Image (cartoon, rainbow, N blue to C red):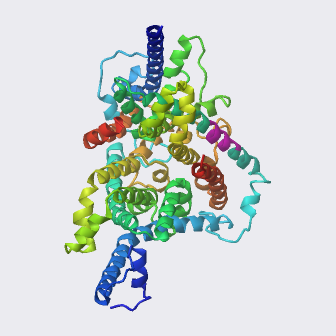
Amino acid sequence: MRPAGSPAALAGDELGGRGSEQAPARRSLRRARDWADRRFFVLAACPAFVLVAAVAAFPILLSSWLSFTNYTPVSQSLSWAGIGNYKQMISGPNASFAQSAITNTVIFVGGGLAFETVLGVLFAVILARPMRGMMFFRALFFLPLMINVVAATIAWGAVLNTSDGWVNYFTHILGLGMPNWLGSSYTAMPTLILVDSWTGVPLIAVIVMVGILVLPRAPLEAARVDGASAFAMFRYVVLPGVRPVLIFAVMFRLVSMFGQFAEIQLLTNGGPGLATTVLNFFVYEQSFVNGDVAFGAALAVVLVLMMAAPLVVLFRIARREY
Amino acid sequence: MGARAQLTTQARSRIVDAACVAVLLIGSAIILFPLFWMAETAFKPPSEAYVMPPKFIFSPTLVNFRGAFAQQQGAGLAGYGTGYGRDLLHSLILLCASVAVALVLGTPAGYALSRSRSAGSRLIAGGLIVVYIAPALVYVLPLYVVYEKLDLLGSFVALTAFYETFELPFVTFMMRAFFSDISRELDDAARIDGCSRWQTFLKVVLPLVRPGLVTVTILTGVGSWGEYFGALIFSGPSTETAPVNLADFVGAGTSNWGALAAGSLLLVVPVLVVVVVLQRGYLRRFAAG
């Protein structure tokens, strides 16, 4: 059997060994079993972690490294560029493009997220009400989450078409004219946010609704008995109760909005001009359309940092005590 | 007095109920709007797809589905003209391969994580979340460079490996949560009865998480079926997926709305059928809270 202090003994503590006074024979038997346990855990877990490391961790490191080079797939040349790619975002021919992509990202994610959170919570509160036929609406709000993003985007593109889209048929009837929703630089970004909220609002609504439904009944009843107004009950009982769930939903949306691609490519292709070129789409254009992978990699680093900052803040809010 | 006060609260709650239903109906209409367009245009004669004002009454036809499958070869921006039928098959192959890898590797890993109390395992679980939430671009960009060097662009291997960046962490993390709900005492009992660790895992614990496994399989499959960005970059003539094919014809200039709607419907309907059939019980529980 294995001597004390060996990996097996350490594993014994780690895997829940109770380390009590036992007969030496039993103890060594337990150690043998712990060793088998440890081998099992390593065998069970390692293939997954090795694959994740290979397809995710390694590429992230490679990408960060590429951002300091001048690599392009066409020339296959590779030399150290220092912070050259990052400097391009501040000065040079690409600077204004990169900066407007960063601004657009802030508008798209910030504006969209605020809009989706407010509406999502509103619908969550309504969907959580005990009413006849509510099951139907709950199922319906689940629907957009199952719809293929390309298919949904194609449908939105069609109904938003200026001359023969259904949206403009109704705006025309209402005497609002026939706006070029996706082609005008004033309306393109708001329209994109509205299309994005077609999945975003139901997602937040459904998650927060579940959060409300599992809230303990007692505080709500107590507030009701004490004569709290509907708003007070929402503000001081429901909202604090669903806060962790709400923050989770917001974080989830935040991440997917930073990575939004299909909607932008298929609806506006980043235009008109640069009106809807968010950072994620700009990286795609730079890397795969223009072939400047190194500059794209540097932009991707900026994208990740931009995404990480609000995530860290949200995470800290989620953990803060009231 | 008391009766009157009660009456007013009753009336007020009825007004609130009515307002809620109104808001829900507006929301539902917006949710159904593009889906209704899709279902309607897919069966509409192509000549009536562009008419303004829209014709909501027409004689349904299947010509658009033929159109979707017969989209002209290589007409799109980046397409390979492989035909929609084959591309649906590619999507299905990729779904099966990537979900199988994710389940086979992720389920035992999730079990191991759920049963280990070390700080390392919590760190790994946190790391998996980070890998899962990072935007696809973060992986696509460097993997493109790697695949190019290894001559893997356009292969199922390349696509499957990329899909594991979101499927494997998702399966591992979700299964960890499901396994955590199952008492360790059950493991111990199985061990005392003479099961090895693998037997405990495969024969005792795994059957208990079957509902969770079904849910995770469906969610992972839906994710794979709908993935677009990675497929756009990595797929080639022999692997082009259905969403890439479809998106390709949006950019092809003359948008054939009928064929696009029919193709979209073919992407959407299988997902809904699978979810409804396999998840009826789960969804009911979910809808009931």
Which residue, as the protein is rendered here, is positioned at the far front? B1
Q: Is residue A107 magenta?
A: yes
Q: Is residue B202 magenta?
A: no
Front residue of A215 and B242: A215
Give the answer, above or below, for where B95 lies relative to B110.
above
Is residue B149 visible in this depiction of the protein? yes
- The answer to whether B40 appears left or right of A169 in the picture is left
Give percent across and percent down for residue B96.
31, 55
Front residue of B94 and B126: B126
Q: Which residues are magenta?
A: A103-111
Give the prevailing secondary structure in the magenta stretch: helix
Give the answer, above or below, for where B70 lies relative to B170.
above
- The answer to whether A262 appears left or right of A40 in the picture is right
Give percent across and percent down for residue A127.
43, 29
Q: Quadrant of the C terminus of chain B?
A: top left
Q: Look at 72% across and 47% down and name the residue there.
A: A97
Is residue A276 visible in this depiction of the protein? no
- The answer to whether A69 appears left or right of A238 in the picture is right
Q: Look at 72% across and 68% down and name the residue there.
A: A81
Q: Look at 33% across and 41% down and name the residue there.
A: B271
Give percent across and percent down for residue A221.
45, 31
State the image quarter where residue B57 is shown: top left
Front residue of A190 and B245: A190
Which residue, as the protein is rendered here, is positioned at the far left? B193
- The answer to whether A87 appears left or right of A63 in the picture is right
Give percent across and percent down for residue B265.
36, 35
